[in-house]
Image: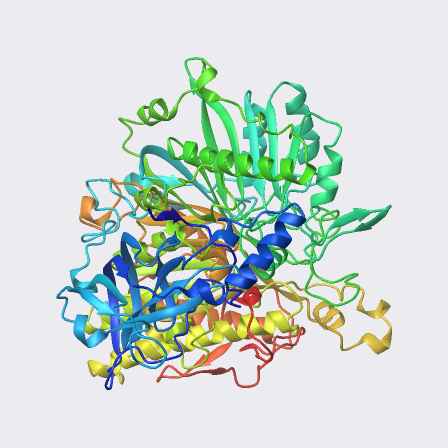
């Protein structure tokens, strides 16, 4: 009997992991026409017959490795030395991008998978390839492949049958070697988007986003935050439906209050959690809001306090020598601070349990645990307690406290005196501007908070098990998690849902993740069962990549506009003019471009606004930063080119230009005042970035946000960036939420929805532009698009000017030129970042690697 497994002996060590598959021979005969596949592919991979025995070529080496492993106390997965034949699996490839992968079946020349795939596509391609591979101790190798021409499936008729598996010579890899499969293309116009039939929130059956681990939860309440702290001084008055005033709240103050009011538990996850961070800085009645002291005090009250923090492999203390680590997360300091308290800290490395040595080193060194959440119990009334959770982009660490004014010099001796953070210089940064920080976060009160709790529990159990194996002893962390079912006053999931049954302001909320089975405990062992839980098979793991799914579904559901704030924006490299095989295969940029193109063809208005940092945090002239900027430039170019082609197709290229539909922005600030002590510097440093930024009194506002608003109806906020690291599921671990108010949708109200999401978007725009204008009510209009673009251009001129002046608006048009034909070029006279240097469109040289995609 065939043995199902999702583990493999070793990874093939491909530099791009799961993203790219090259078939080094033809898989279809004749000339092939490249066509656009935009929609979904519905695929069944059923079975293969008469596969060659690939292991016979490697059995000798496999025996040797097995004997060595046993000799030194090890074990080869699957008892390699006893293998007698191939361990086959199938990858599904479009434009060299892997879009699906079956599980491995060990020791079988006649494997039966019966595995179903329903995957979104937005690819220009000539064929869909099915690559049969063998997994063995030396790494995977291609057995053979099948190519199904796109021309054959583009009509939407299902293609099914048994196909010969071709080898490198164009003939069957073995006589009688065949693969049974079926494939059907569902074009976008025939795709039912569950989030939307005429509006994002029109899903009356409350199905939410399909293909996710957690279901949509009804009856919740969501609070949306902009920045760590909200200062309401001189902020314009905003009203939502029914004349209700929209009042932004202060995120860190709410977290401070929630922790203080906890009676049972405080669970925190973070990329960085720093015990010295002050949560409250504007209330004289709060004498101590230091995170570490608060958590110690709560633990002494009997509250279970657990911290799950990414273990930066470059930060270590050894023989009295302390190394802060490349990322300066403070993980070792925080762990040591709580060492003799009842607060339990698990420093959690990003590890790969299975795979090659190279893959394990890459995962542990390059990738991180990037989730940010705070989970506490709260008053539920009637002497009961419930779970609430904060989730988003804010870590509780250095440099994150900021307000909508984003000061750069004026608070260095007050609010930010002990919280200076600016890693964008080489060498000392004395007297330089701080790096302002803009972020998005949320609080979930309702049943979805229990899904965020479940994520914490799954991760804690895996991390505690790993710690146990590292220490070769029974870990004390195994029983740290509270069993809420045994606490009488704690509400369960079902009870929490009933609290908002009659609340017209209630929300539907769904939790999404990027994570794999190396980082959680509780995924099914049987890959077939895993498929039922909407998990996908990776090379060595099971993967939850529902954040990517959620973004794609929400973009496809959009009717009028999309507003994005994200720390990175790159992807869909399979459709770039160059570097198609980079492996940045997330669909988000291409889906946005195709959404605009389809709206142009329908002669409907649609606008997209994307806010990103001026450059990724770090020295802008450095190789990694320049590479990211280069990938970002290629992404922009692809999107604008797609839009221009659609304008030409319908004859509108003289009436409109691509920037009437899509615009990129960044944020920056400039403070008038004294020279900042520039005269104290040695003359020889006069042209350094430090001196120039001090003299010109300007700096970017770092956009660390990870969020999207669609049609003022639907919002996604979390920890995931729009890049491959955050969205693939096997790289950085991430968490996000998607939410909407069912009674505040265009479908429900037959008008523009003016619920909390509308108020939130308008508050963000007021923060960034310094004003509110009537056209902001209609973001999809060409008037609004051009107005916001003009404001961004004016603000950039003020930011880049020789004359120093105080900035009221911070929204800057991203400093590249986009011509009417969609060509992206350096901005004339401003090819590098002011003061800091570094090409704005980036540069690329050397080998391609995972770090920057």
In x, y percent, where is residue 444?
A: 43, 36
Q: How is the image coloured?
A: rainbow
Q: Residue at x 58, y 71 (%)?
A: 799
Which quadrant holds residue 436? Answer: bottom right
In x, y percent, where is residue 290?
A: 69, 35
Q: Can residue 19 be seen in this snapshot?
A: no
The residue closer to the viewer here, 59 or 20, is 59
Viewed as shown, does residue 823 lie left or right of 702?
Answer: left
Q: Can residue 406 be seen in this snapshot?
A: yes
Viewed as shown, does residue 486 lie left or right of 108?
Answer: right
Which quadrant holds residue 29? Answer: bottom left
In x, y percent, where is residue 704?
A: 54, 56
The residue closer to the viewer here, 787 or 375, is 375
Viewed as shown, does residue 785 lie left or right of 486?
Answer: left
Q: Residue at x 41, y 41 (%)?
A: 525
Q: Is residue 481 above or below residue 818?
A: above
In x, y percent, where is residue 23?
A: 39, 75
Q: Is residue 710 above or below residue 662?
A: above
Q: How many marks?
A: 0
Q: Is residue 40 above or below residue 456?
A: below
Which quadrant holds residue 778? Answer: bottom left
Q: Residue at x 65, y 66 (%)?
A: 698
């Amino acid at each position: 009997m065939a043995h199902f497994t999702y583990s493999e002996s070793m990874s093939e060590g491909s530099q791009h992991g799961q993203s790219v598959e090259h078939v080094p021979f033809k898989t279809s005969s004749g000339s092939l026409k490249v066509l656009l596949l935009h929609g979904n592919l519905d695929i069944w991979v059923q079975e293969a017959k008469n596969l060659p025995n690939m292991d016979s070529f490697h059995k000798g080496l496999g025996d040797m490795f097995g004997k060595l492993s046993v000799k030194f106390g090890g074990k080869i997965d699957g008892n390699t030395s006893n293998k007698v034949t191939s361990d086959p699996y199938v990858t599904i490839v479009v434009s060299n991008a892997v879009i699906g992968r079956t599980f491995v079946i060990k020791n079988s020349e006649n494997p039966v998978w019966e595995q179903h795939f329903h995957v979104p596509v937005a690819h220009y391609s000539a064929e869909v390839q099915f690559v049969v591979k063998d997994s063995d101790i030396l790494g995977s190798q291609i057995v053979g492949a099948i190519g199904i021409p796109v021309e054959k499936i583009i009509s939407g008729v299902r293609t099914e049958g048994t196909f010969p598996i071709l080898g490198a010579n164009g003939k069957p890899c073995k006589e009688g070697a065949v693969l049974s499969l079926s494939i059907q293309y569902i074009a976008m116009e025939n795709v039912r988007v569950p989030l939307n039939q005429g509006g994002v929130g029109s899903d009356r059956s409350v199905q939410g986003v399909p293909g996710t681990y957690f279901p949509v939860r009804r009856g919740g309440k969501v609070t949306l935050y902009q920045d760590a702290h909200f200062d309401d001084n001189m902020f314009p008055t905003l009203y939502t439906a029914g004349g209700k005033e929209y009042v932004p709240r202060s995120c860190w103050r709410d977290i401070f209050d929630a922790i203080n009011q906890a009676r049972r538990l405080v669970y925190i996850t973070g990329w960085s959690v720093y015990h010295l961070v002050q949560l409250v800085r504007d209330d004289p009645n709060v004498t101590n809001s230091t995170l570490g002291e608060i958590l110690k005090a709560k633990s002494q009250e009997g509250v279970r306090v657990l911290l799950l923090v990414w273990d930066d492999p470059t930060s270590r203390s050894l023989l009295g020598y302390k190394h802060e680590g490349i990322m300066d997360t403070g993980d070792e300091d925080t762990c040591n601070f709580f060492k003799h308290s009842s607060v339990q800290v698990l420093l959690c490395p990003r590890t790969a349990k299975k795979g090659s040595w190279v893959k394990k080193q890459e995962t542990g060194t390059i990738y991180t645990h990037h989730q940010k959440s705070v989970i506490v119990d709260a008053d539920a009334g009637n002497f009961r307690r419930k779970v609430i959770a904060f989730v988003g982009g804010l870590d509780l660490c250095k440099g994150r406290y900021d307000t909508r004014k984003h000061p750069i010099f004026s608070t260095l001796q007050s609010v930010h005196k002990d919280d200076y953070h600016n890693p964008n210089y080489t060498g000392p940064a004395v007297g330089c501007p701080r790096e302002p920080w803009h972020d998005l976060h949320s609080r979930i009160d309702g049943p979805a908070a229990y899904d965020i709790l479940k994520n914490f529990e799954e991760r804690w159990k895996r991390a505690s098990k790993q710690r146990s194996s590292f220490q070769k002893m029974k870990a004390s962390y195994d029983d740290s998690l509270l069993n809420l079912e045994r606490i009488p006053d704690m509400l369960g999931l079902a009870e929490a849902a009933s609290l908002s049954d009659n609340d017209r302001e209630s929300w539907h909320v769904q939790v999404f993740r990027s994570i794999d089975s190396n980082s959680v405990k509780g995924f099914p062992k049987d890959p077939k069962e895993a498929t039922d839980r909407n998990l996908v098979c990776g090379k060595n793991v099971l993967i939850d990549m529902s954040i990517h799914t959620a973004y794609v579904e929400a973009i496809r559901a959009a009717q009028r506009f999309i507003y994005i704030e994200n720390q990175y924006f790159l992807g869909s490299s399979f459709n770039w003019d160059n570097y198609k095989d980079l492996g940045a295969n997330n669909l988000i940029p291409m889906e946005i471009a195709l959404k605009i193109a389809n709206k142009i063809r329908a002669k409907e208005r649609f606008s997209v606004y994307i806010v990103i940092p001026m450059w990724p945090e770090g020295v802008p002239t450095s190789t990694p930063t320049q590479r990211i900027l280069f990938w970002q430039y290629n992404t922009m170019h692809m999107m604008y080119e797609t839009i221009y082609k659609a304008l030409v197709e319908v004859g509108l290229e003289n009436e409109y230009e691509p920037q009437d539909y899509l615009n990129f922005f960044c944020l920056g600030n400039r403070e008038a005042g004294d020279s900042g002590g520039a005269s104290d510097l040695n003359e020889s440093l006069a042209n350094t970035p430090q001196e120039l930024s001090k003299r010109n009194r300007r700096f970017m506002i770092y956009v660390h946000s990870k969020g999207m608003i669609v049609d003022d109806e639907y919002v996604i906020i979390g920890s995931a960036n729009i890049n491959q690291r955050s969205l693939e599921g096997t790289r950085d671990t991430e968490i996000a939420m998607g939410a909407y108010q069912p009674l505040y949708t265009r479908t429900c109200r037959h008008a523009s929805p003016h619920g909390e999401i509308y108020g939130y978007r308008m508050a963000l725009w007021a923060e960034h532009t310094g004003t509110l204008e009537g056209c902001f009510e209609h973001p999809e209009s060409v008037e609004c698009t051009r107005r916001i673009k003009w404001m961004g251009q004016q603000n950039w001129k003020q930011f880049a000017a020789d004359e120093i002046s105080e900035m009221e608006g911070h929204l800057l048009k991203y400093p590249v030129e986009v011509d009417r034909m969609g060509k992206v070029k350096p901005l004339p006279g401003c090819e590098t970042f002011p003061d800091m240097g570094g090409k704005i469109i980036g540069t690329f040289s050397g080998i391609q690697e995972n770090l920057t995609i």
